Amino acid sequence: MDTVDHNADVLKTLRRDPLQSALTNSTLRGFHISKQFLDNKAALTSLDYDSSGKKCITTSSDESLRIYDCVGGKREQVLYSKKYGCNLAQFTSHPGCVAYASTKINDTIRYLSYDTNQYIRYFVGHNQRVTSLQRSPTAATVLSAALDGVVNVWDLGSVKPASTVTPVGGSVEERGITAAYDPSGMVISVAVGSAELQLYDVREVSKGPFKSQSIVDIAGQALVAGIRFIPPLGDHILLAMTDGSCHLLDSFSLQHCASLRSTDLQGALNGGHPEATNGVSGSALSKMQDAYLGQNVTVTPDGKTVLVGSQNGSISFWDISRYTTTEAHDSNAPALRPSVLTPDGVWNGSHEGPVGVCAFNPHIMECITGSESLAIWTSSLSY
């Protein structure tokens, strides 16, 4: 599928700052698929934009890494990691380089030059499956969490971790673990399964968390599959759960603000990715993989809308601006009871399988979603 208006839509908005654009419900309802790629033969497992928003990279359960030109709407490169598998690929601050997690043989994070298709170095330090991998928004580092119960900050120039966190909060193999940077790169959020959410100062991780909060009442029987700080300031945290729900928390108080639920998401997490578990006997890995490690959840750059891929091939979105405005942090304002929010809209595209990856472009009005096919969504509305 090659709909005619992809280049026009993208080039029209490339120089606009989406934080100043009107990403309203009307605008989002006007999104449509302007380009679709059918070259994948297996389910996509991760998706990441580079810092410019001009390129994206995907991994797939067929052990391929694919790089796309998001402005021109074309595939640029296909690489394979057949021996070690691949997931959670991330562009780094070094041009032409990506880091990704191995899914078999070992649990090494591989740092690759995609220009030369050669490895630069290996980040060896985890001995169980990596469940989170994220580049720092402000430094030449990447953050990883794994089912060995360890969270590492890696300097791209060294094979050894720059710092290590070993959170406390129960059996990681049973509960899982995931981590994320805030937009400043100065705070790390770590969720240990359904037990606790912890915040660390990246400069003083050895001192332990400066803030922690039980999330048992929020999570119930579900585990945290992924974490997102809400852009642009990171003043809220979004927890993507293994039951398909998402929970919004205030980053300062860790107070629960709202839950995002949809009938389209229920029962969505029973397929998963048929990957080896490297000997992990607990159920956390399979549950987190069935929830796509949170890769099916994204937030618009203005921080007002959450989008989640569904089992039926659709993408649901929620307006969360009520909770992410400046007034929400007013100490004199009455506390809001946690609300259960239903979707404000749904994109029904042509994905024939579960939408396991979803990412909104950081700079232009474009969103990419994927099952086995990869779709670029743009808006033809004026804004």
Image (cartoon, helix red, strand yellow):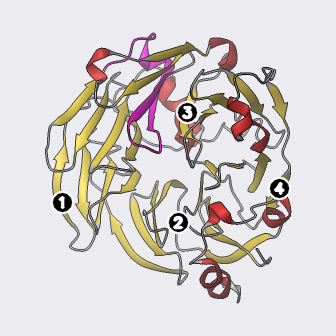
**Badge count:** 4
Marks 1, 4: nearer the viewer: 4
C-alpha separation, residue under disc 1 versus residue under disc 2: 25 Å
Closer to the chain start, of discs 3 and 4, is: 3
Give percent across and percent down for residue 285.
Answer: 48, 30
Closer to the chain start, of discs 1 and 2, is: 2
Closer to the chain start, of discs 3 and 2, is: 2
Which residue shows up at 59% across the image and 74% down it? Answer: 38
**Residue beneath disc 2:** 41
Residue 119: mark in rendering = 1
Mark 3: few, some, or many residues within 10 Å (few <14, many ≥20)? Answer: many
| Stretch in magenta | 166-192
Residue 225: mark in rendering = 3
Mark 4: few, some, or many residues within 10 Å (few <14, many ≥20)? Answer: some
| Residue type (three-letter) at the residue carrying disc 1 | Tyr
Residue 346: mark in rendering = 4
Q: Tell me the quarter of the image containing the N terminus.
A: bottom right
Quadrant for residue 32, please give it. bottom right
